[in-house]
């Protein structure tokens, strides 16, 4: 049989997940008739467990036989081993379990070990049993066949049986007692660590482990951590069997209490090791009430007597402020003492050196992380450039080692890089699958939400008839906004490098530009658009920097400047306009010139204003001519010359930019839009300077213009004194307009004088009448 269609049973599994067991059974049964291997296995499972149907072991066996799934072989072995619906037959069971092992079901080794350990249907063979038990015991945390919890149970059962085997001296004549019991204790402890309660009790009864002779640092560290876990096992057993004791658990509880009594007695006598264990008990609440101050007291006493583990414990307390105020200097002191005795504590000392304090020394911290082999930290320092310049290839190399060693943060980091295409080819689909189990982490959640919105856009684009709709533009803008929501979670304080944050922000900018140029953008609610611009306003400096590094186009920069201005964020728009002005864009030059004229966002400076308006005129910005003329009435002859020279300097800078960059200067459509929307929110406000009642400077006479023309000075940028035809036309128009206004005003002035005359005459008559009376 073979699985003809991987998606054939998808609906069946969905029904099973929704607890529609009867419908799920019917679905699998129908698919099994096509010869589908997985469907046959699932029908067998449902018959075996009575799920969605009545239990029927014979039907289960039939369906397992019709399937070629490895777990079907394993189930057949269990059926004959346990006698489910058939007579127990260990030979058949052994054959099926052997086939299952050959197909990769590692858990079947447990049953094969039991068959040879107990002599079920075969001659008892301890050596063969040990081989099978060790295979499953050393198989790691994951299994291709079963979920991790079920797999862990088989591991702990096998380890417990290995403990039993080595505890029986009759099984071994070639091992001395210490070696045999050492192996027994080892396997009981590993079984207890994997959750086996019986093994926990046996470990407690075995008492505390003791350091090895010869000063083997690694071995002694292992002994130390085993002893710490024994205290944890003791706490578990006492709570577990507090009200339901049996003879077996009673022995373990008594042993645990005896150990506590011994630690209390010896610590009161000043024994540093006992003081250390009391510190651990109070730190974790192990058979005593949790009390961090008491823990600190015992740890300090032991540390001052030279007990290495207490020195390390105290150093970490002082580093983290546990039971005492943070004191980095004292933390470094105690951790240095511990590290001098055992290099294992290099990592803790490195943490102390990287903490923010007057003692911070990142170079020293990095050296210690390298000495310890802390690949995650080494990668982090290289990504963030905390010691040298950022080195992403080196960081990736270290992250890979850390990930292979089981460091979850390193695995997440590599998946994030895969999502963003950092130091690897972008693979969003794979990254999505790898990151999904870590959805509870806020930064991962925010990134996966980007993926969600991008998928939505893809689905919308599949409907070609809607590509130009408002909904499409809004969906794209929504995706851009999600990028803005995500990227603050990846700043350096969150231990993420600049590259990661920039990729997310650039992704958001890219989506916004796609929305902006979309036909449906104008239909999106203005409040929603303004909300986005306000959100991205905090990144205005990054936007300018992205352009300087050629990460975004000049047109994109202009779009943001204009959007900031329209949203009322003029203070953020001005630095962008200044950059655009220096790149040679006329409207930006006009806006910068008016900013200097008004003293808004720039110190009021009519000389610089005149220079920038001059350049704007040269770029054909018509509204700049009138503004430049009025500025000329506010500055002296010498200042006009100075402004012309300044304009030449600005032009040189602009020309150098044009030569040294590949910028696209064809953005007249954006500039045209800029000119159209120069309304009272910006342009008119700047022009209001010329209507102030009090003028700082006296307007110049026309003779100044004549004398300046006689100088015959030639300037690179056009000047109102090298008058163009357009300039002359504008001036003539201005004089003519003045004459017309005067002529129109004269009749009104005469009428006003006549009214004043009549009012005065009537007033005199009234006074004369009063006096006569």
Image (cartoon, helix red, strand yellow):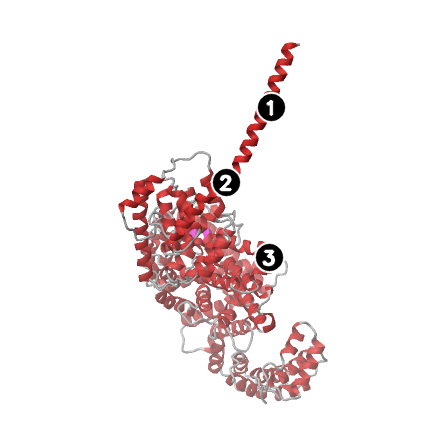
Q: Are marks 2 and 3 in contact (CB under 8 Å)?
A: no
Q: Secondary structure at mark 2?
A: helix
Q: Is residue 766 above or below residue 160?
A: above
Quadrant in which residue 463 is drawn: bottom right
C-alpha separation, residue under disc 2 versus residue under disc 3:
45 Å
Find out whether residue 217 is within the magenta segment. no
Query: Residue 82: x and y, percent?
Result: 62, 81
Q: Which residue is mark 2?
A: 741
Disc nearer the start of the sequence (3/1): 3
Q: Secondary structure at mark 3?
A: loop
Q: Is 588 drawn above or below residue 631 in the view shown?
A: below
Residue numbers of the magenta segment: 274-279
Distance from the alpha carbon under mark 2 to that under mark 1: 28 Å
Identify which residue, 409 or 646, lies in the foreground.
Answer: 646
Taking 61 as reference, is 613 left or right? left
- Give the residue number, with chain letter if any, for mark 1: 759
Report which quarter residue 493 is drawn in.
bottom left
Residue that mark 3 sits on: 525
Q: Mark 2 or mark 3: which is in front?
A: 2
């Amino acid at each position: 049989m073979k699985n003809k269609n991987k998606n054939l049973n998808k609906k069946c599994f969905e029904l099973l997940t929704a607890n529609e067991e009867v419908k799920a059974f019917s679905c699998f049964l129908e698919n099994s008739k096509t010869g589908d291997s997985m469907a046959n296995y699932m029908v067998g499972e449902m018959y075996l467990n009575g799920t969605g149907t009545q239990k029927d072991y014979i039907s289960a066996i039939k369906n397992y036989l019709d399937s070629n799934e490895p777990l079907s072989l394993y189930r057949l072995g269990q059926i004959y081993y346990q006698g489910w619906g058939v007579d127990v037959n260990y030979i058949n069971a052994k054959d099926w379990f052997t086939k299952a092992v050959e197909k990769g079901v590692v858990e079947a080794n447990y049953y094969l070990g039991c068959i040879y350990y107990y002599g079920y249907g075969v001659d008892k063979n301890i050596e063969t049993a040990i081989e099978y038990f060790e295979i499953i015991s050393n198989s790691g945390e994951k299994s291709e066949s079963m979920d991790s919890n079920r797999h862990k149970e088989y591991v702990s059962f096998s380890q417990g049986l290995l403990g039993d085997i080595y505890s029986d001296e009759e099984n071994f004549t070639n091992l001395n007692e210490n070696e045999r019991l050492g192996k027994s204790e080892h396997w009981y402890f590993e079984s207890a660590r994997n959750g086996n309660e019986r093994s926990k009790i046996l470990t407690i009864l075995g008492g505390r482990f003791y350091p090895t002779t010869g000063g083997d640092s690694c071995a002694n560290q292992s002994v130390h951590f085993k002893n710490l876990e024994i205290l944890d096992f003791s706490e578990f057993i006492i709570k577990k069997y507090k009200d339901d004791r049996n003879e077996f658990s009673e022995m373990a509880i008594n042993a645990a209490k005896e150990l506590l009594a011994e630690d209390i007695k010896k610590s009161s006598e000043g024994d540093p090791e006992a003081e250390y264990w009391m510190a651990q008990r109070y730190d974790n609440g192990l058979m005593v009430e949790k009390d961090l101050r008491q823990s600190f007291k015992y740890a300090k006493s032991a540390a001052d007597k030279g007990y290495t583990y207490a020195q390390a414990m105290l150093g970490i307390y002082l580093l983290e402020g546990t039971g005492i105020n943070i004191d980095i200097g004292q933390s470094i002191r105690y951790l240095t003492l511990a590290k001098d005795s055992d290099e294992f504590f290099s990592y803790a000392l490195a943490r102390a050196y990287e903490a923010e304090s007057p003692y911070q020394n990142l170079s020293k911290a990095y050296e210690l992380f390298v000495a310890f082999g802390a690949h995650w930290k080494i990668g982090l320092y290289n990504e963030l450039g905390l010691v040298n310049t950022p080195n992403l290839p080196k960081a990736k190399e270290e992250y890979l080692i850390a990930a292979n060693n089981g460091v979850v943060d390193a695995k997440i980091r590599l998946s994030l890089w895969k999502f963003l295409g950092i130091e690897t080819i972008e693979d969003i689909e794979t990254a999505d699958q790898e990151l999904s189990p870590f959805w509870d982490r806020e930064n991962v959640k925010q990134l996966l939400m980007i993926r969600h919105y991008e998928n939505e856009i893809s689905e919308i684009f599949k409907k070609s008839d809607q590509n130009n709709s408002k909904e499409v533009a809004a969906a794209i803008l929504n995706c851009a906004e999600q990028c803005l929501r995500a990227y603050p979670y990846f700043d350096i304080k969150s231990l993420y490098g600049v590259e990661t944050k920039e990729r997310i922000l650039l992704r958001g900018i890219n989506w916004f530009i796609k929305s902006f140029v979309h036909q449906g953008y104008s239909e999106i609610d203005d409040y929603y658009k303004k909300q986005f611009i306000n959100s991205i306003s905090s990144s205005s400096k990054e936007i300018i920097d992205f352009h300087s590094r050629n990460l975004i186009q000049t047109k994109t920069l202009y779009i943001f400047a204009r959007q900031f201005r329209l949203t009322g964020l003029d203070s953020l728009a001005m630095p962008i306009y200044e950059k655009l002005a220096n790149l040679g864009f006329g409207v930006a030059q006009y806006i910068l010139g008016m900013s200097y004229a008004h003293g808004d966002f720039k110190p009021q400076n009519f000389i610089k204003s005149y220079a920038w308006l001059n350049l704007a005129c040269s770029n054909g910005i018509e509204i700049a001519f009138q503004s430049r003329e009025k500025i000329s009435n506010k500055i002296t002859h010498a200042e006009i010359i100075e402004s012309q020279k300044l304009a030449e300097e600005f032009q040189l800078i602009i020309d150098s930019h044009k030569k040294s960059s590949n910028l696209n200067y064809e953005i007249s459509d954006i500039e045209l839009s800029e000119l159209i929307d120069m309304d009272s929110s910006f342009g008119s406000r700047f022009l209001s300077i010329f209507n102030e009642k009090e003028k700082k400077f006296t307007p110049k006479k026309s003779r100044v213009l004549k004398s300046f023309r006689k100088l015959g000075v030639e300037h690179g940028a056009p000047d109102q004194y090298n008058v163009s035809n357009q300039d002359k036309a504008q001036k003539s128009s201005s004089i003519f307009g003045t004459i017309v206004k005067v002529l129109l005003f004269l009749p009104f002035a005469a009428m006003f004088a006549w009214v004043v005359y009549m009012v005065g005459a009537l007033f005199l008559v009234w006074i004369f009448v009063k006096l006569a009376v």
